[in-house]
Image: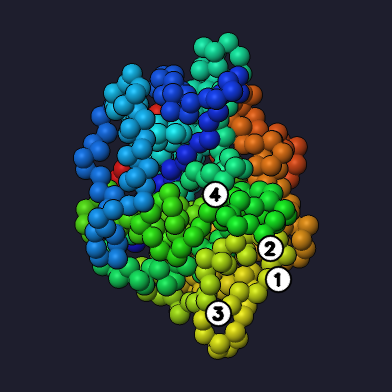
Amino acid sequence: MSDIVPLLGIETEYGIVREDQEESDPVEESMQLLARCELKSVFRAWAYNREHTHLDMRGFRVSHLAQDEEEDEFCEQDRKRPYSYWEMKSDRVLTNGARFYNDHTHPEYSTPECRTVFDLVTHDLAGEKIVGECVRLRNQDLGGDFLQLFKNNTDYSGHSYGTHDNYLIPRKLPFEVWVRHLVPFLVTRQLYAGAGKIGAERKNEDGFTGLQLAQRADFIDSVLSIETMTQRPIINTRDEPHATQDYRRLHLILGDANMSPYATALKVGTTRLVLTLIGAQKLDAPFELAEPVADVQRVSRDITGATPLQLKSFRPRPKTSWVRVCRSCCLRVGRWIAPPSRRMLLVCGSTLALGRRSTRTFRLLTVTETFEAVEDRPQLAPPCAGLFLRLSKTLFVPHTGRSRAIGDKEQRKNLTTPFAVP
């Protein structure tokens, strides 16, 4: 598996707000937060001139991105600030290999590249601790619990910020092969990887007020796109590998921020398994969905698993349930994977089996994530305990075995230590 998908990582954009101010400035607050990071780091040295955001994996270079205009507007506003560009970005590369910086209107924490799923999960948790400690120190300066950070993906006012999972994959396989197999899998992945929310935020919304499985679903508008802030896609096509040209970096922006390590492990673990089998060219022809973008919203809003999805081919059936699509992905992967990797698939399968039994079980599987997003946002600090963390101490929270064993000792190690390079 490590030969085909050798590295993985997660980028988390955090919501930020000052509750003691009528109009808080997220740029200023993000800068002040990063200034309170006391970990050793390389500061303000990120090589922006080596980023290439306009190259597309479909084989061309775009001349213009929609986000370019927004960046120009930001630059015009920022000229009025008493800071240099480097001061505003506040880039830090920490000794654990992570990048912690101001992505203009929110702080962002990017884990180091990891070789295993469980290394990535522990580094994601270590990132929560690093960011949470910065919030604690900043509030100490402010003299009260005024600064709040949230690990979620929406402000419930129509704005979304992302959590991106990344995978290093071989370039030799044509990009369209990856797309064909990945789309139905990613459309249905939100069953076990969604963070949940109440209501809807799509433009021209029809008044939906129920429970959704995923926060990000309302903001997905296309199957493929190089854009990340408008026309957000199921699969992002930016060709920026941060590696040699033997590889692509698959940059997925449709996922949710997960407070649950169980959900994080399932999200990146199952995706890596599917990518491995695609790279080895061992998967059969996938389900081809007729309306994949609309299906992202249909799946998110259906906690019963009964809503049919239209297929492109009418053989053997014109429609199928999205749970069946998801289970089919698992079964096709299961024929080929080696026993050491099979545990992740078994956990995914048992989650799907639980979900089929009752609507109540769907709610149980997402309760600690959804309540976090709706009733008490996923608050890191203070008091460093959103509702998910409180519920996880008293209620049943699913675990993958080893994810439950991720203790403070391993998380503390990952505050300063990167993954081991052979």
Distance of label 2 from label 3 (alpha carbons): 18 Å
Distance of label 3 from label 1 (alpha carbons): 15 Å
- Residue 174 vs residue 189: left or right? left
Mark found first going from the N terminus, 4 or 2: 4
Crowding around mark 3 (Cα neighbors within 10 Å: few <14, some 14 to 19, many 20+) is some
Q: Amino acid at mark 3?
A: Leu
The residue that appears at 25% across and 38% down in the rendered structure is 48
Residue labelled with disc 1? 306
Is label 2 in a helix, a strand or a loop? loop
The percent position of residue 323, horizontal first and vertical second, equals 64, 69
Q: Is 390 placed above or below 347 here?
A: above
Residue furthest out toward the bottom: 315
The percent position of residue 144, horizontal first and vertical second, equals 61, 14
Distance of label 3 from label 4 (alpha carbons): 26 Å
Mark found first going from the N terminus, 3 or 4: 4
The percent position of residue 163, horizontal first and vertical second, equals 48, 46
Q: Amino acid at mark 2?
A: Asp
Residue labelled with disc 3? 311
Distance of label 1 from label 4 (alpha carbons): 23 Å
Quarter placement of the C terminus? top left
Residue labelled with disc 2? 302
Contact flag, marks 1 and 2 (Cβ < 8 Å) = yes
Crowding around mark 4 (Cα neighbors within 10 Å: few <14, some 14 to 19, many 20+) is many
Q: Which mark is residue 256?
A: 4
Quarter placement of the N terminus? bottom left
The residue that appears at 27% across and 33% down in the rendered structure is 46
Q: Is 21 placed above or below 416 here?
A: above
Distance of label 4 from label 2 (alpha carbons): 17 Å
Residue 6 visible (yes or no): no
- Quadrant in which residue 179 is drawn: bottom left
